[in-house]
């Protein structure tokens, strides 16, 4: 049974998602026995990241800069603003799609029972952003959950007050999926959201 | 198998969900849905989706073993979603776990059904608020005064928290018309003033029963 500093290290690794006692122990032994340099590097980086990374003043994504690299880019379409729930979703859209507009990260969704209201998900900042008048279309990329839909509605009402068009990302059958195995909600979305075949 | 609605869910460990459900015959109860954060159940375990659930285990939090959608989710869109969140927050805050209010399950379901089509969703909320308070033991009597007289539609009353309807109208901020009290009691309204007065009265009663701690879902209506 590990004790002292070693035990503290193992316990600390347990704060990572998907890491239990067993994996935490493996990580701690690996760094101590085989890769002390890697461990030191990890420690320093963790320390710096926790100190310096905050939120972008424009889109609220995670960055150590005042304004993140996406928001300060000159080559993007400044009429498009894509609203996502998490920085992870921003990264997914950025890496996997051709979208080259700007983003706004909510860090959550409207969910009163989780204590998340309009103030907690940055609605004031979004309002200011829309009031600047550059954005012509808000793309609502919140998740297809009840809370995500409520959030999309809240933002679309706000956008309407600023005469900004809103669009919602499509929901439906995943590529390579089979209709027979879809849940009812997804299937009815796919049917009601059908469009002209080109 | 029991009929149920999900009121709230949150991630638990890596792949599980911790659910808070309103279950027929059980009232409000917590359940753990193991592996549900990744699998097919994720789409089914949503608020406003009529469900049937089965579970096993002992202790306070039991394990969900089976969940099925019994029909299409209720079609709550736009502002009606906020109304739904409001109902769920009221249930989470006012209904203690394990209080098997069977009636309340029916009231909740009916309110959701009516919300879908009602021209005046606010009135559906008033009726739900009143029934919730009555079912959870806050005796709210609206058709007679605390002096024992029946409420008459063309008299002005006031409502004293803790006592009830009274002819004594010295507390000027709590004035309410008899017709509003009877409208709430009977569940049918006739004019906009009744709906407005009913809202003010129910808000006072709900706020009082929550010890004046604010409801987060109300922020959505501003």
Image (cartoon, coloured by chain):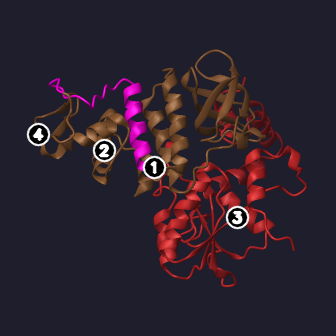
Chain colours: A red, B brown
Which mark is on residue B169?
4
Chain of the residue under the numbered disc 1 shown in the image = B
Chain of the residue under the numbered disc 3 shown in the image = A
Q: Residue at x 48, y 70 (%)?
A: A127
Chain of the residue under the numbered disc 4 shown in the image = B
Q: How many marks?
A: 4
| Range of residues picked out in magenta | B120-149
Asked if labels 3 and 4 touch by Cβ distance under 8 angstroms, the answer is no
- Based on the displayed image, in which of its 4 quarters is residue B141 positioned? top left
Chain of the residue under the numbered disc 2 shown in the image = B
Alpha-carbon distance for marks 2 and 1? 13 Å
The crowd level at tag 4 (other Cα within 10 Å; few <14, some 14-19, many 20+) is some
List the residue tagged with mark 2: B198
Q: Is residue A25 left or right of residue B152?
A: right
The crowd level at tag 3 (other Cα within 10 Å; few <14, some 14-19, many 20+) is few
Which mark is on residue B121?
1
Query: Considering only vertical position in the picture, is B131 above or below A193?
Result: above
Point out the residue furthest to the bottom here: A74
Alpha-carbon distance for marks 2 and 4? 17 Å
Element at badge 1? helix
Same subunit, labels 4 and 1: the answer reads yes
Same subunit, labels 3 and 1: the answer reads no
Element at badge 4? loop
Q: Residue at x 48, y 68 (%)?
A: A125
Q: Is residue B161 left or right of residue A114?
A: left
Which mark is on residue A169?
3
Asked if labels 1 and 3 touch by Cβ distance under 8 angstroms, the answer is no
């Amino acid at each position: 049974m590990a004790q002292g500093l070693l035990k503290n290290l193992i316990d600390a690794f347990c704060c990572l998602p998907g890491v239990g006692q067993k994996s935490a122990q493996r990580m701690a032994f690996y760094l101590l026995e085989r890769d002390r340099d890697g461990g030191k590097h990890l420690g320093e980086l963790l320390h710096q990241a926790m100190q310096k990374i905050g939120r972008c003043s424009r889109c609220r994504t995670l960055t150590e800069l005042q304004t993140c690299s996406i928001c300060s880019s000159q080559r993007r379409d400044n009429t498009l603003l894509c609203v996502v729930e998490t920085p992870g979703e921003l990264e997914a859209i950025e890496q996997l799609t051709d979208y080259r507009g700007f983003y706004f990260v909510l860090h959550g969704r409207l969910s009163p029972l989780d204590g998340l209201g309009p103030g907690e998900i940055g609605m004031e900042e979004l309002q200011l952003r829309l009031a600047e008048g550059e954005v012509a279309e808000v793309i609502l990329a919140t998740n297809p959950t009840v809370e995500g839909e409520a959030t999309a509605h809240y933002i679309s009402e706000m956008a309407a007050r600023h005469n900004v068009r809103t669009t919602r990302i499509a929901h439906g059958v995943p590529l390579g999926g089979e209709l027979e195995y879809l849940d009812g909600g997804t299937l009815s979305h796919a049917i009601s959201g059908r469009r002209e075949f080109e | 198998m029991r009929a149920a609605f999900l009121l709230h869910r949150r991630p638990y460990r890596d792949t599980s969900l911790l659910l808070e459900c309103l279950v027929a015959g059980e009232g409000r109860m917590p359940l753990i849905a193991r592996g549900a954060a990744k699998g097919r159940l994720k789409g089914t375990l949503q608020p406003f989706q009529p469900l049937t659930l089965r579970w096993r285990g002992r202790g306070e939090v039991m394990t969900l073993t089976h969940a099925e959608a019994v029909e299409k989710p209720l079609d709550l869109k736009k502002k009606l979603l906020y109304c739904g969140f409001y109902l769920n927050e009221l249930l989470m805050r006012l209904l203690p776990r394990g209080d098997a209010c069977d009636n309340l399950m029916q009231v909740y379901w009916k309110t959701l059904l009516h919300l879908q089509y009602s021209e005046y969703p606010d009135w559906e909320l008033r009726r739900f608020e009143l029934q919730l308070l009555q079912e959870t033991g806050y005796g709210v009597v609206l058709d007679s005064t605390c002096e024992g007289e029946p409420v008459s539609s063309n008299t002005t009353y006031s409502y004293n928290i803790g006592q009830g309807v009274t002819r004594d109208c010295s507390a000027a901020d709590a004035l309410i018309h008899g017709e509003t009290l009877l409208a709430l009691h009977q569940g049918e309204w006739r004019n906009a003033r009744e709906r407005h007065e009913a809202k003010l009265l129910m808000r006072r009663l709900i706020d009082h029963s929550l010890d004046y701690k604010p409801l987060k879902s109300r922020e959505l209506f501003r």
